Each structure stands twice: as structure tokens, then as C-alpha cells.
Image: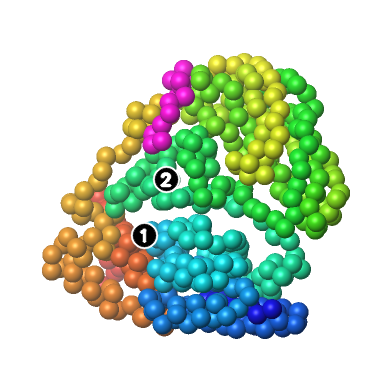
Amino acid sequence: GRVALIGGFATAPRYQGSGSSKVNSHTLDRPLDALRAAVEGGGGALVYAAGYEPGHAALDDALIDEAVAAASGADAAIILAGLPDEFESEGFDRSHMRLPEQMDRLIAAVAAAQPRCVVVLSNGSPVLMPWLGGVPAVLETYLSGQAGALALADLLFGAACPSGKLAETFPAAAEDCASHAHFASNPRRLVYREGLHVGYRHFLTQGVQPVFPFGHGLSYTSFEYGPLSPSESAIAISDPAAASVLTLTLELRNAGSCDGSEVVQLYVASSRRSGGVHRPARELRAFRKVWLPRGESKTVRLDLDARAFAFYDTRAGGWRVEGGEYELVASASSEDVRSRAVVSVSSEGAAAPHEGAVAANPPYVEATDEVLGQMGLQVQPERSVRPFDRRTTVGEMGEEAGCCGKCLYSMLICGMPKATNPIEHRLRLEMTRTLPLEILFNFANGGHLREPSTREPPPPPEGC
């Protein structure tokens, strides 16, 4: 058949991060070359259309029209998309979760013209997918490295079976994340008010439906889970640091038509969430990746230590275990529950939470100052830019210190060698802008920040 390959990443792949993670690759395989070899090796033909410029993905209707024409004349389309270097890097935060507008428009247009398509994403963090309902498949490759193009060809044409699982939640909107309301709300202070509601714990506990949950990942095959069997129905925990307190087993069967791997995930939930300390709905406590030929089965073993049932008591300064019933959940993702079991836990000498701990299971999304105070944490008051001190940044001096501050900022920026790579140049600018004066003066051995000495200076050498 005829396959249309769409996307500038085909010739200039996004395969690694920027900043300190960037390496000089010995060789770099291009998706265009790898996919052309795979298609033509099977007797087909591949046509290519850029669809966007890979460096910036600026708006360009002509490139979209060209891609739509190529896809319309093909039997199937492969769309390569993701985040260009300038959209994410260490040293600066993303301001939104969207793909470049050119890519969103491209995917929607190509999918409308050619329903038999797959979107391949190259990105280092979750993105929004407004076009998801119009495409039959999405392959998340993240930043797959210098040989990622060869792996991509194997996955798309069936030489290998996808078996990865998401290590993060893909939300439907940034506003769905627990940290959204307070992250970057103040340029000089950041309070982690989500408490225990980090990642999948927030989505599960608050009942927020993501686009793709933590631990999700489809395959060309399917797996059947047998009953989850604990080694004991009741356990006693005297030491919260005990290495092994419970073993669980289940039978896993590859019920599909090809060989593949599955990641069995074990979550633990306390049935006493209506009392005692606040706990998320359930938490990942063990996992195991299992490779199975088609039609075969294997007994999967998962071991839990005492910490799987414990919480950290901030007032007591240590790990504690509450007695009661705990539900154990074997899942294919944080939301795809396949098998359950219940075990009764008794805890010697630590059955009740420490007085003053966060109790009554408050249904918070953002921990208030009061809740944080119950954890023994005190939120520091906001610090104003003035008066200036050693923690004042170069950027704040440039904005708030009048002509002198602007002069200092300009001298530092102008005196900085400009990098040929625009991302590296942006990193240098951001580093300079956020540099505290304390660090800047340390470049002069900290002499400008030393406290005045109360001692008499040593006498000069003789003859001086």
C-alpha cells in the first residue's frame, strides 16, 4: 500500500532533551529513512510531507494543505508530532500544555482527510490532545533517543509489540491538576498545597477523569488477570520498617494473538478513609513486568513490605501503621482494576494516629495553611522585592532598581556570549535573570557579602 508520512520530525527528530541532558549523538537515525525502509521492504510506497517546520512549528497553511493532499492520496497516514525544543527544557517552565497550534491544526486536517492514521508523539511531558476523538491511535514515544526511529518502525509495522505504561497522568486540562491554582502564582514563593494529592492520587481521590491515567498503555495483545490471592488474610505489623510482610499472587494469561509484556500494578487502599489520618483513595505499592508468549500463562508474585501500609506521622517524626482492613487492587493502570483482595492489618503499639495528625480525612484538593499546620508545616509569609537583599535576583534588580538596576541587568546580558543554539541562549538568559545577587557576588569569592569583622586588622609587615 501507499503510506503518507507527515511531520517535520521525520527529518529532524525530537529525540532528546535540552540543557545539561543534551548529548552529542554518535549517529542519529531519522524516522523518514527507517519508515521508508520498512514500507518499501514490504512492497509499499512512502510519500512524505513536512506539515510544519520542526524547529518552531510556526503557522503555515501551505504546509498543512500539502500534508492533506499527501494523506488523501495514500492508504494510511503516520503523523509525527510533539513538542519542539523551544517548548520545553530545563531552566524554564512551560506556560501551557498545548502542542504548537500548527501541529493541532495539522493533525485535525489530516485525520479528517485520511481516517486511517496514527499520531506519534515525541515530547518530554504530557500534552493536550483536542483532536483525540478524530484519530484511531496514538503512540507516545516520549524522547526515544538516537535509535528511536528504528524502534518506531518496529512498533508501527508489528515487528515489536508496544508494552510501555505511562509514568504520569495525562489530564484533560491543566486546571484538572491539583497544583494548578497555586503553582507559579507568586514569583518569589511556591507552596506545595496539593499535599498527598500528587499525580494519580489526586485524580483517583477527587474523581477527576483524565484523558489517560497513570499506568495506562495499550498493546497489540490482551491480558487476562486471575484472582488476587494474599498469602495471609490477616497480618500483624510491629515494625513499620519490616522488609516483607505479605505476598500476593495472581495468574496472568496472554489472551491475544501475539507475544507481549504486561505491567501488573498493585495498589493499596485503606478501608478506614472515613476516619484516622487522611489517605489517598489508593496508592501504587508494587509492580512487575511480565513477558508472555501468546496463549501462555504465568503466576505473578508481588511482595509488600510494612511501608506499603504505613503513613509518615509528621508530629511523631516516623512511620506508623494504622490497624484495620486494607483493599489490595491488581490493575492494568491506576483506573483499570482487574482483581481485588482484602487483608486485615493489626499494628502493635501504633494503632491510633498521633494526636494532632491530619484526621477526619479532609476532602481537600489544596491544603490550606491550617491543614499544613496540622502537619507541622508553617507557610512563610510572602517576601516583597524591597528592600533588596542577597536573595534579590538580577531580573528583579533590572525591574525594580531604577536606572542602576537596568544598567546592571543590561551589562550582564550584553556581556554574555550568545549561544548559536536559540534554546541554549534562552537558558543563559533565564539563568541570568533568576540569578540571586548572593550567587553573583560569589563569583568574586563572596567578598561583597562578608559580614564586617569586629577584629582588629593584623599589623602591616615590617618595612611597609
**Image spot of residue 93 (x, y percent):** 39, 60
Question: In the drawing, what numbered circle is on residue 176?
Answer: 2
Q: From the viewer's perspective, tell me whether residue 6 is left or right of residue 184.
A: right
Query: Secondary structure under badge 1?
Result: loop
Q: From the viewer's perspective, tell me whether residue 176 is left or right of residue 78.
A: left
Kindly tell me whether residue 37 is visible in this rendering: no
**Residue beneath the point at 71% across and 70% down:** 157
| Residue marked by disc 1 | 95
Question: Which amino acid, mark 2?
Answer: Asp
**Does the segment drawn in magenta span residue 75?**
no
**Residue beneath the point at 52% across and 64% down:** 123
Toward which corner of the image does residue 464 lie, by quadrant?
bottom left
Kindly tell me whether residue 32 is visible in this rendering: yes
Span of residues in magenta: 354-367
Q: Main secondary structure of the magenta part?
A: loop
**Image spot of residue 199 (x, y percent):** 51, 44
Q: How many marks?
A: 2
Q: Is residue 265 above or below residue 12?
A: above
Query: Secondary structure under badge 2?
Result: helix
Question: Which amino acid, mark 1?
Answer: Ser
Distance from label 2 to label 1 (Cα)?
15 Å
